[in-house]
Image (cartoon, rainbow, N blue to C red):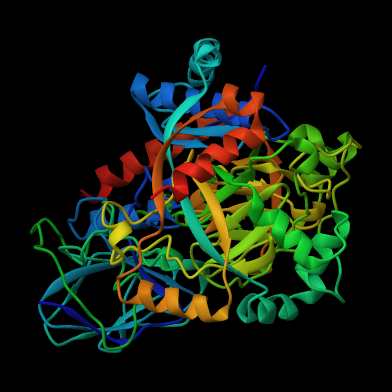
Amino acid sequence: MSRYTFGGDEHVFVEVDEEMSLEAFFTSLAMTNAVREANIDGVIEICPANASFQIKFDPDKIHPQKMMDMLKEMEQTAEKKEAKLDTRIVEVPVYYQDPWTHETLMRFRERHQDPNGTDLDYAARINGFDSVEAFIKAHHSAPWFVSMVGFVSGLPFLYQMVDRSRQIQVPKYLRPRTDTPKQTVGYGGSFSCIYSVRGAGGYQMFGITPMTIYDPKQEAPYLRDFMVFFKPGDIVKWRPINREEYDSINADVQAGRFEPRTKDVVFSLDDFNADMDGTNAKLMEALYAD
Amino acid sequence: MPINVISSGIMTTIQDLGRPGYYHLGIPMGGAMDRLAMRTANLLVGNPEDAAGLESVFVGPELEFTEDATVAVCGAELPPRIDGEQQPTWTALSVKKGQVLSFDFLKAGARAYIAISGGIDTPPHLGSRATYPIGALGGVDGRAVQPGDSLPLGKASGKARPGTSVPEDYRRLPGATAKLRVLPGLYWHRITEESQRRFFEDIWKVANEADRMGYRFQGGRPLDFVPREQPFSAGSDPSNITDACYPYGSVQVPSGQEPIVLHRDAVSGGGYFMLGTVISADMDLIGQLQPNTTTQFVKVDMEAALAARKERKALIAAIREAVG
């Protein structure tokens, strides 16, 4: 049973689970979809998160207690829905151990758990990897699920599609940084993220992608429909690249020539739970077919 | 006919009442930090309450008018000058073509709202002209106002009555010690009963890290967490949670050290626990707090929060009545 609480007089906050799981994500998604479909007078924002969600409403139109009671009723039906999604898989190039995030992490060393190392050294060590290279491989070998969009404009939180025992976990910085390069690939808890814009951040920094994921001018061809690229339920496959390829993709992005490799797929949580590696292999086939 | 920006102060941005509806993508509602002051300034110059004006922090801009207009400055006590001559705040003022509006030193509060008849008519982005610099949305090319900018104005309603003033009783600024009412909730149960008590007992001070995204507070005792094994995904610090949404006004406390109250340009979510939320009626006051202002958080329940909200609505209605 979810935990319901108020965020002041304008928000109801629902924690589906304290822990992250795709089950909790799908419940949150189903409930926020139900709230959207119900078209409740007074609802202002519907924000699904990883294993929780939040509704902002106008208490002059709907009493906070009534809002909460309606959500509790919706949970009954939402839980019964089949966890299946028509979605897409996207390949995102990542330049691990790049010079820009390195410069930034050195600048904020005194806010870090391990002031003498790098974020990757630290993450590899506390997760029991022999080398940074082996850790990086684990990061990009299995695909990721976009389980939340937010923090700042269009930033995706991603959850790796592997068994709990293979999940990587790292803490956030002791005190958040005031600066993070745009398009940094970060890590906190069991979530990867891509910082969509330059700014504050508390996640460990692993690398950077040349792919723009947020652009209010919508110049990139893949951002023509909307200024934000990711939505919850998208699946991501990281592809490691070197400096040379980073520069070349970056030039393509700037010239409006880049299109991320993307395929439409169906994701079923039951199928995934029954055979994770098999499901992931099928996703890779779909992504790289043709 | 535009307004020419001669100097811009420290951080002058175009703001209106914001762009709700995109927080699920990390795009905050934004808009004036002190919405009551923004609305009031608009009312004084005959604008719709949601028209765009300027929000100035600590230091006002210098603006040259290329047509006759009515202006009003509400919120912080940042006294306006027209061609050097000092003018009252909270009052509809006539400015003639060619005159320059400038400002004296700040006397109280932090953010002044400058409304101009017709409203600033820069292009709206996702339904609002509010500047959100991080996302490069709204404002002038998604940024704060700069010297050399020309700000276009919309058509004035003709309803402005220069000389009209807002009665003293209706001008809201925080006192010497600010009191911010908080409804406990969210992850309140994560801190010990003693910390729950101390949070409301302690005297806090506004830190220098205080802006449109959030206000940090210092000086109170650190929080102790109820011992537990951290849930999977949350991260190892007891103040970490599985990344979730952050309500506007929510009080997050990274590492249990210094509370941060999230405001109009808030990040929409993240992995720090929150102990509760500043009630909607007190959000405007936060934007008027200068660094070092002593602040006490006051514990309230939902009933008190809704009563305060009603009071604030009645105040807006009274202002409409008084200046309309």
Tell me the residue at 42%/65% (across/down): A212
Q: Position of residue B319 (x, y in %)?
A: 32, 46
Report how many numbered discs are placed on residues in the image: 0
The one of B87 and B158 positioned closer to us in this rendering:
B158
The one of B237 and A213 positioned closer to us in this rendering:
A213
Q: Position of residue B46 (x, y in %)?
A: 17, 56
Tell me the residue at 46%/50% (across/down): A288
Vertical comparison of A155 with B148: above or below = above
Q: Position of residue B195 (x, y in %)?
A: 86, 42
Tell me the residue at 20%/51% (across/down): B48
Quadrant placement of the N terminus of chain A: top right
Q: Is residue B151 visible?
A: yes
Q: In the shown orientation, is residue B8 left or right of residue A273?
A: left
Q: Position of residue A69 (x, y in %)?
A: 53, 14
Name the outermost residue toward the front. Answer: A290
Vertical comparison of A62 with A283: above or below = above
Q: In the shown orientation, is residue B137 left or right of residue A24?
A: left
Vertical comparison of A170 with B108: above or below = above
Tell me the residue at 33%/41% (across/down): B318
The one of A137 and A35 positioned closer to us in this rendering:
A137
Q: Is residue B303 visible?
A: no
User: In which quadrant of the rendered view does residue A255 lie?
Assistant: bottom left
The one of A144 and B315 positioned closer to us in this rendering:
A144
Q: In the shown orientation, is residue B117 left or right of residue A118?
A: left
User: In which quadrant of the rendered view does residue B255 lie?
Assistant: bottom right
